[in-house]
Amino acid sequence: MVLKLATDDMKVSILASGSTGNVTYIETPEHKVLVDAGLSGKKIANLMASIGRDINEVDSLFISHEHTDHCHSAGILARKYGLDIYANQGTWDAMAHKIGKVPAELCHVFDPDTTLDLGDLDVESFSVSHDAAEPQFYELHHAGKSFVIITDTGYVSEHVEGVIRDADGYLFECNHDLEMLRMGRYPWPLKQRIIGDEGHLSNEDGANALMDVIGHRTKRIYLGHRSQDNNLKSLAHLTVASMMTEHDFGVEHDFQLYDTDPEKATKLITL
């Protein structure tokens, strides 16, 4: 039997998650990577410092799609820190005018539904349903552990369920409360977009999708991409926890729910 040292573990922090900006940090012994860069470079650097990490040590950035709350500082991070940027061709084409010129050697096309081998870190991409050019999210694998990031999708397909089932941890979308959205200030066309098949998961949608994919390996679930206008942190947490309790998921599965914040990083944890 080969015993793995603690330093072999995968570590995760949700630096920011919400409708105003999204950044996730993942660390292995050989790699320090970000998924999405929806805040300014300065804010991301400060959030990393808050968990005791230096942005100069990050080597790669994975972009899910071209919306500003996911790619805002991608170009700046590449030019200033030399990060390799990975995105599919549709996303590259759609975000090029937003992020500015990036050195060619740092631009990498990462096709949907493929796996990238980075040594001690495998990154698996999967397509989602969102009103972007070619949206995709990621499952990151290291030493038998896996962490899934899935937000910005109108629904979770059976194919995606199969890809992300029984991960050790999830960052899962709980974007809006349906009643708050219905009664809120958004114009009707925008409300339709949010609840549509290319929109966002509600709290109830997120809970139902989670119950379809979590397994006995699952230990940590982060509720993310919460709307500032149409949701509350406490409401998202209560909705998911209540629905899971109603279906006895607290009995059959040993996991914990965690909230995320658009301006404050979660604690850096080991999966």
Image: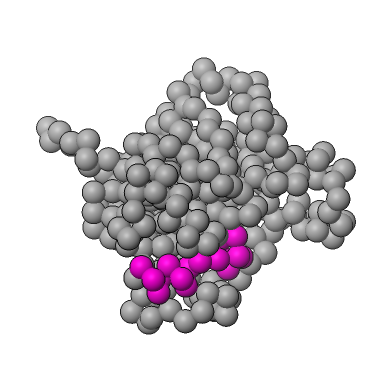
Tell me the chief SS of the magenta region: helix
Image coordinates for residue 169, horizontal then vertical, percent: 44, 38
On the rendered structure, is 130 left or right of 28? right
The structure residue drawn at horizontal position 22% and vertical position 35%, both measured from the top left corner, is 6
Query: Which quadrant is home to the N terminus?
Result: top left
On the rendered structure, is 6 left or right of 174? left
64 above or below 143? below
Front residue (pair 265, 205): 265
Q: Quadrant of residue 236?
A: top right
Image coordinates for residue 172, horizontal then vertical, percent: 56, 43
Residue 159 visible from this viewpoint: no
Front residue (pair 266, 168): 266
216 above or below 114? above
On the rendered structure, is 237 left or right of 82? right
Q: Quadrant of residue 268?
A: top left
Image coordinates for residue 149, horizontal then vertical, percent: 49, 49
Is residue 96 one of those drawn in magenta? no
Is residue 70 one of those drawn in magenta? yes
The structure residue drawn at horizontal position 70% and vertical position 56%, both measured from the top left corner, is 199
Front residue (pair 35, 145): 35
Image coordinates for residue 229, horizontal then vertical, percent: 75, 47
Colouring rule applied to residues: one colour
On the rendered structure, is 252 left or right of 174? left
Q: Which residues are magenta?
A: 64-81
The structure residue drawn at horizontal position 39% and vertical position 71%, both measured from the top left corner, is 80
Residue 258 visible from this viewpoint: yes
Query: Which quadrant is home to the C terminus?
Result: top left
